[in-house]
Structure formats: structure tokens, C-alpha cells
Image (cartoon, rainbow, N blue to C red):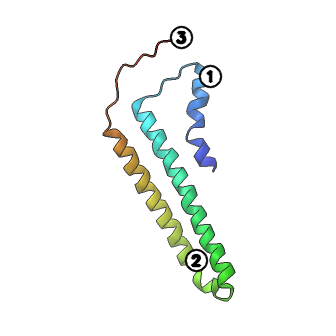
Amino acid sequence: DICFISSTIPKMLVNIQTQNEVITYKGCVTQVYFFMLFAALDDFLLTVMAYDRFVAICRPLYYTVIMNPRLCGLLLLVSWIKCTLYSLLQSLMVLWLSFCTVLKTPAF
């Protein structure tokens, strides 16, 4: 959860300190990548933890056999890989979009 927050807070603190609310396109895509990576990773890890509790409650005598260190490492590795690929795919799809280069909003 600390990584999830750390993907947006540093830029926000810089914006508050400098009174400059500009972010580059690369910076925006990078921030979106890490934000989605940690959000998806949080969901996947909660799912792995739920499976662990399911095995512990429903199969208590087989828990140590089912949830061996190799399976735990594999679940963690698969979670990281899937989240990384998902976030990369979403960030690369944003690159296909076209945005206005100069956009001014009138102040009322």
C-alpha cells in the first residue's frame, strides 16, 4: 500500500511547493503505469492471501502440503508478472491516444 501512494504523492508535493501544476507526457504515462501496477498488485496479493486462508480453513491437515514454499513463490511471481504486463499494456494503449497540445481553459 505504501508503494500505491508513493506513485502520486511526490509529484503532488512538488506541485504544491513550486505552485506549478504541469506534468510532462512521459511523466504522466509513467505515473499512470506505476499507479496501475500497484493497484493491480494489491488486488492480486489480496487474492493470493484469500486462497491461503481458504486452504488453511478448508484443508487444515493438508495445508503444509498444498501451500509449500514453491507454490507461494510461484503465486507471488505470477502476480508480479501479470500485474506488470497488465500495467504495461494499459500504459502503451494510452500512447495511441491523441491529445491536444495546447489547451487553455478560461478562468471565470
Q: Amino acid at mark 1?
A: Gln
Q: Nearer the viewer, residue 106 or 62?
A: 106
1 or 3: tag closer to the N-terminus: 1
User: Which residue in the protein does label 2 denote?
Assistant: 69
Q: Nearer the viewer, residue 24 or 52?
A: 52
Mark 1 to mark 3 CA distance (whole Å): 25 Å
User: Residue 30 at what x, y percent from top left?
Assistant: 44, 40
Q: Earlier in the sequence, mark 3 or mark 2?
A: 2
- Residues marked 1 and 3 touching at CB (< 8 Å): no
Q: Which residue occupies 64% across, 84% down?
A: 64
The extreme front residue here reads 108
- The front one of 27 and 102 is 102
Give the class, few, some or many, for how many residues have Cα within 10 Å of label 2's Cα (few <14, many ≥20).
few
| Numbered disc 3: secondary structure | loop
**Residue at the image point whose x is 55% and y is 41% from the top:** 7
- The residue depicted at 49 percent of the width and 48 percent of the height is 36
Mark 2 and 1 residues: CB-CB less than 8 Å, in contact? Answer: no
Q: Amino acid at mark 2?
A: Pro
Give the vertical position of 32 relative to 51 (above or below).
above
How far, Cα to Cα, is label 2 from label 1? 46 Å
Amino acid type at mark 3: Phe
Q: CA distance from mark 3 to mark 2?
A: 61 Å
Residue that mark 3 sits on: 108
Few, some or many C-alpha atoms within 10 Å of disc 3 (few <14, some 14-19, many ≥20)?
few
Badge count:
3
* Residue 96, image x, y percentages: 30, 40
Instruction: Choose the circle earlier in sequence order: 2 or 1.
Output: 1
Q: Which residue is mark 1?
A: 17
Specify the quadrant of the image occupied by residue 92: top left
Q: Going 53% across and 66% down the picture, which residue do you hit? A: 76
Residue 84, x across and y down, in percent: 44, 55
